[in-house]
Image: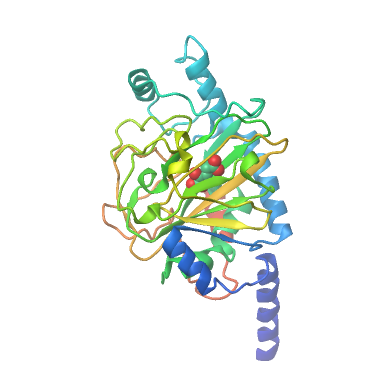
């Protein structure tokens, strides 16, 4: 009887492991040291084609729902409305509730920063964003919580524990002119600490023409905090603090920029504090990416002023609390191999809906 039970458990676990993709050694020493020194590293062929296929389908579904999402924005429409029409104020373009719209308009009126567009792109495509998609999409949730990625995050950061901290999708259709302004992710987040990384996962082959990210090598160690910006221009989010970041896109030759051409399956991991930005998409195919954020042992909750609201995050954390909570679940180590957090969330989110 006992033997039969054990056999059954092993079968369940190996089915589960197959579902999560092949097990890979977390990371090698070279990757750890590159991440530590440069603040960014590209890991090749970490995710298998099935996982990428499911993620690509998920990104398409999410992109279709951008205007209905409380954290969704069509950056192209917003930029055009703000810069190309006489009446930028009305009507609302989306259901996005992350920013104080009137305050953004006032800030733009005062600073009048140029919009960051790539004039070489046709301008036919749209740049679309959404956040916290793991709360709504099972494929994103499974990848974020139950794949090999949390263990990779732990390996790169030398962390003993990993909390998942949210995601954002960045879709630039073919011909998108809008750049992604250089910025530092850390100051967008309501947390404080050193151990934090972002995994940029592009489901399409991408290079400089299609808008891969450029990272300022070693900028995570500058000891500087830059005010978060609105992505389409170097205008700070109203109420935020931090230094203003030089317009790197105007003088790229002054910086040690690192960029990776990527194939589906590759992931690029950067430190929360690494400065980075992207061009438009001048190619004739989409550049669909998901960014997953993970934090290590020392990260604590901190309600940083001027950070975007997160309509899909409701929690009871107080200043200085460790992140462990339903919103920032511990995803590594797992209590036992094959343990699935995705399924636990499935029930929870379904009953909350
Ligand atoms: O893909 C992009 O355009 C921006 C991505 C980004 O800034 C990030 O993943 O932190």
Instruction: Please report the residue visible at 51 percent of the width from the left and 12 percent of the height from the top.
Output: 85
Instruction: Please report the residue visible at 33 percent of the width from the left and 63 percent of the height from the top.
Output: 298
**What's the colour scheme?**
rainbow
| Quarter of the image where one finds residue 26 | bottom right
Which quadrant does the N terminus fall into?
A: bottom right
How many numbered tags mark residues here? 0
Left/right placement of residue 231 relative to residue 175 reads: left
| Quarter of the image where one finds residue 146 | bottom right
Q: Position of residue 171 (x, y in %)?
A: 61, 39
- Residue pushed farthest front? 253
Left/right placement of residue 81 relative to residue 286 reads: left
Q: Position of residue 2 (x, y in %)?
A: 65, 90
Instruction: Please report the residue visible at 71 percent of the width from the left and 78 percent of the height from the top.
Output: 11
Relative vertical location of residue 301 with respect to residue 75 in this rendering, above or below: below
Regarding residue 300, the answer to whether it shows in the image is yes
Regarding residue 136, the answer to whether it shows in the image is no
Q: Position of residue 289 (x, y in %)?
A: 60, 46
Relative vertical location of residue 102 with respect to residue 97 in this rendering, above or below: above
- Residue pushed farthest top? 86
Instruction: Please report the residue visible at 50 percent of the width from the left and 34 percent of the height from the top.
Output: 70
Which quadrant does the C terminus fall into?
A: top right
Foreground pick, 222 / 5 = 222
Foreground pick, 118 / 90 = 118
Relative vertical location of residue 80 with respect to residue 274 in this rendering, above or below: above
| Quarter of the image where one finds residue 99 | top left
Foreground pick, 155 / 167 = 155
């Amino acid at each position: 009887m006992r033997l039969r039970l054990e056999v059954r458990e092993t079968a369940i676990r190996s089915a589960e492991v197959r579902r999560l993709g092949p097990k890979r050694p977390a990371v090698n020493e070279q990757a750890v040291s590159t991440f530590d020194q440069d603040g960014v590293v590209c890991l090749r062929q970490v995710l298998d084609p099935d996982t990428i296929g499911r993620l690509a389908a998920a990104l398409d579904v999410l992109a279709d729902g951008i205007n209905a999402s409380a954290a969704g924005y069509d950056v192209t429409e917003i930029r055009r409305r703000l810069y190309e029409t006489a009446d930028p104020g009305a009507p609302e373009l989306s259901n996005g509730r992350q920013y104080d719209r009137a305050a953004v308009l006032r800030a733009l009126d005062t600073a009048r920063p140029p919009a960051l567009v790539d004039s070489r792109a046709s301008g036919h495509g749209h740049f679309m964003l959404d956040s916290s998609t793991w709360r709504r999409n099972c494929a994103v949730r499974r990848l974020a919580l139950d794949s090999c990625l949390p263990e990779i995050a732990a390996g790169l950061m030398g962390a003993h524990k990993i909390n998942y901290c949210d995601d954002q999708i960045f879709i630039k259709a073919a011909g998108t002119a809008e750049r992604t302004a250089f910025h530092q992710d850390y100051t967008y987040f309501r947390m404080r600490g050193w151990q934090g990384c972002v995994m940029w996962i592009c489901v399409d082959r991408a290079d400089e023409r299609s808008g891969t990210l450029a990272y300022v090598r070693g900028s995570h160690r500058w000891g500087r905090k830059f005010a978060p910006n609105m992505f389409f221009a170097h205008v700070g989010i109203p109420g935020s603090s931090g230094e203003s970041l030089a317009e790197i896109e105007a003088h790229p030759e002054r910086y040690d920029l690192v960029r990776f051409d990527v194939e589906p399956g590759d992931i690029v991991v950067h430190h929360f504090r690494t400065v980075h930005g992207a061009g438009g998409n001048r190619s004739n195919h989409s550049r669909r990416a998901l960014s997953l954020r993970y934090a290590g042992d020392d990260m604590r909750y901190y309600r940083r002023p001027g950070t975007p609201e997160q309509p899909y995050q409701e929690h009871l954390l107080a200043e200085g609390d460790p992140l462990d909570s339903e919103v920032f679940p511990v995803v590594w180590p797992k209590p036992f191999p094959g343990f699935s957090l995705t399924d636990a969330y499935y029930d929870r989110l379904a009953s909350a809906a």
